Image: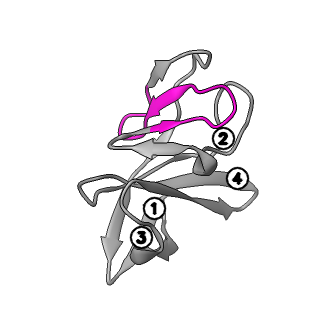
Amino acid sequence: MPWIDACAADALESESAIRFDHRGRTYAIYRNHENGYFCTDGLCTHEDVHLCDGLVMENTVECPKHSSIFDFTTGEVESPPACNNLRTYPARVEAGRVLIEI
Protein backbone atom coordinates (compact mmCIF):
# COMPACT_ATOMS: atom_id res chain seq x y z
CA MET A 1 0.00 0.00 0.00
CA PRO A 2 1.31 3.46 -0.82
CA TRP A 3 1.83 6.18 1.78
CA ILE A 4 -0.27 9.23 0.92
CA ASP A 5 0.56 12.79 1.96
CA ALA A 6 -2.65 13.78 3.77
CA CYS A 7 -1.98 17.11 5.49
CA ALA A 8 0.48 19.27 7.39
CA ALA A 9 1.10 17.96 10.90
CA ASP A 10 0.49 21.42 12.33
CA ALA A 11 -2.94 21.57 10.64
CA LEU A 12 -4.17 19.56 13.63
CA GLU A 13 -4.18 20.94 17.14
CA SER A 14 -3.84 18.60 20.10
CA GLU A 15 -7.04 16.55 20.51
CA SER A 16 -8.52 17.37 17.11
CA ALA A 17 -9.44 15.72 13.82
CA ILE A 18 -9.40 16.66 10.16
CA ARG A 19 -11.19 15.21 7.15
CA PHE A 20 -9.19 13.77 4.27
CA ASP A 21 -10.82 12.61 1.03
CA HIS A 22 -8.95 10.36 -1.39
CA ARG A 23 -10.21 8.43 -4.42
CA GLY A 24 -13.87 8.64 -3.44
CA ARG A 25 -13.34 7.66 0.23
CA THR A 26 -13.38 9.76 3.36
CA TYR A 27 -10.88 9.38 6.19
CA ALA A 28 -10.42 11.10 9.53
CA ILE A 29 -6.96 11.96 10.80
CA TYR A 30 -6.55 12.57 14.52
CA ARG A 31 -3.94 14.10 16.77
CA ASN A 32 -4.20 12.89 20.35
CA HIS A 33 -3.16 14.57 23.61
CA GLU A 34 0.34 13.07 23.36
CA ASN A 35 0.98 14.35 19.80
CA GLY A 36 0.34 10.95 18.24
CA TYR A 37 -1.29 10.84 14.80
CA PHE A 38 -3.89 8.25 13.78
CA CYS A 39 -6.22 7.56 10.85
CA THR A 40 -9.60 5.81 10.55
CA ASP A 41 -12.44 5.65 8.09
CA GLY A 42 -14.03 9.08 8.19
CA LEU A 43 -17.66 8.11 8.66
CA CYS A 44 -19.38 6.75 11.75
CA THR A 45 -20.38 3.11 11.30
CA HIS A 46 -23.84 3.88 12.69
CA GLU A 47 -25.19 6.50 10.23
CA ASP A 48 -22.32 7.73 8.02
CA VAL A 49 -21.75 11.02 9.86
CA HIS A 50 -18.33 12.68 9.46
CA LEU A 51 -16.22 11.94 12.52
CA CYS A 52 -13.92 14.91 11.88
CA ASP A 53 -16.74 17.04 13.32
CA GLY A 54 -16.81 15.02 16.56
CA LEU A 55 -15.29 15.70 19.95
CA VAL A 56 -11.74 14.33 20.27
CA MET A 57 -10.54 13.57 23.81
CA GLU A 58 -7.28 11.73 24.44
CA ASN A 59 -7.60 8.62 22.16
CA THR A 60 -11.33 8.78 21.44
CA VAL A 61 -13.71 10.53 19.09
CA GLU A 62 -17.40 11.04 19.82
CA CYS A 63 -19.74 11.04 16.82
CA PRO A 64 -21.50 14.41 16.61
CA LYS A 65 -24.89 12.89 15.74
CA HIS A 66 -25.71 10.10 18.21
CA SER A 67 -22.66 10.23 20.53
CA SER A 68 -21.11 6.86 19.75
CA ILE A 69 -17.53 6.86 21.01
CA PHE A 70 -14.67 5.16 19.17
CA ASP A 71 -11.07 4.54 20.21
CA PHE A 72 -9.29 5.86 17.13
CA THR A 73 -6.07 4.02 17.99
CA THR A 74 -7.79 0.64 17.53
CA GLY A 75 -11.08 1.55 15.80
CA GLU A 76 -13.09 -0.14 18.57
CA VAL A 77 -16.56 1.10 19.51
CA GLU A 78 -16.62 2.16 23.15
CA SER A 79 -20.30 3.18 23.38
CA PRO A 80 -23.46 2.60 21.32
CA PRO A 81 -25.50 3.12 19.23
CA ALA A 82 -22.70 2.16 16.80
CA CYS A 83 -21.88 -1.56 16.96
CA ASN A 84 -19.28 -1.89 14.20
CA ASN A 85 -15.65 -0.89 14.69
CA LEU A 86 -13.89 1.62 12.45
CA ARG A 87 -11.15 0.49 10.12
CA THR A 88 -7.79 2.01 11.04
CA TYR A 89 -4.81 2.89 8.85
CA PRO A 90 -1.14 3.45 9.72
CA ALA A 91 -0.13 7.10 10.09
CA ARG A 92 3.25 8.75 10.56
CA VAL A 93 4.80 12.20 10.42
CA GLU A 94 7.70 12.98 8.10
CA ALA A 95 9.15 16.43 7.44
CA GLY A 96 6.13 18.08 9.05
CA ARG A 97 3.58 16.18 6.94
CA VAL A 98 1.11 13.48 8.02
CA LEU A 99 1.34 10.41 5.80
CA ILE A 100 -1.25 7.64 5.87
CA GLU A 101 -1.06 4.16 4.39
CA ILE A 102 -4.32 3.40 2.62
**Disc 3, SS:** strand
Nearer the N terminus, badge 1 or badge 4?
4
- Which residue is drawn at the image coordinates 48% and 23% (left, top)? 77
Residue 80's spot in the image, x, y percent? Answer: 56, 15
Disc 3 marks which amino acid? Val
Nearer the N terminus, badge 1 or badge 2?
2
Q: Nearer the viewer, residue 60 or 84?
A: 60
- Residue 63 within the segment the image draws in magenta: yes
Name above or below for residue 45 compared with residue 33: above
From the image, tell me which residue sits under label 4.
Answer: 25
Q: Which residues are magenta?
A: 61-76
Instruction: Find the residue positioned furthest to the bottom.
Output: 95
> For residue 48, which quarter of the picture?
top right
From the image, tell me which residue sits under label 3.
Answer: 98
Q: CA distance from mark 1 to mark 2?
A: 17 Å
From the image, tell me which residue sits under label 2.
Answer: 43
> For residue 67, which quarter of the picture?
top right
From the image, tell me which residue sits under label 1.
Answer: 100
Q: CA distance from mark 3 to mark 4?
A: 17 Å
- Which residue is drawn at the image coordinates 32% and 77% (left, top)? 94
Q: CA distance from mark 2 to mark 3?
A: 20 Å
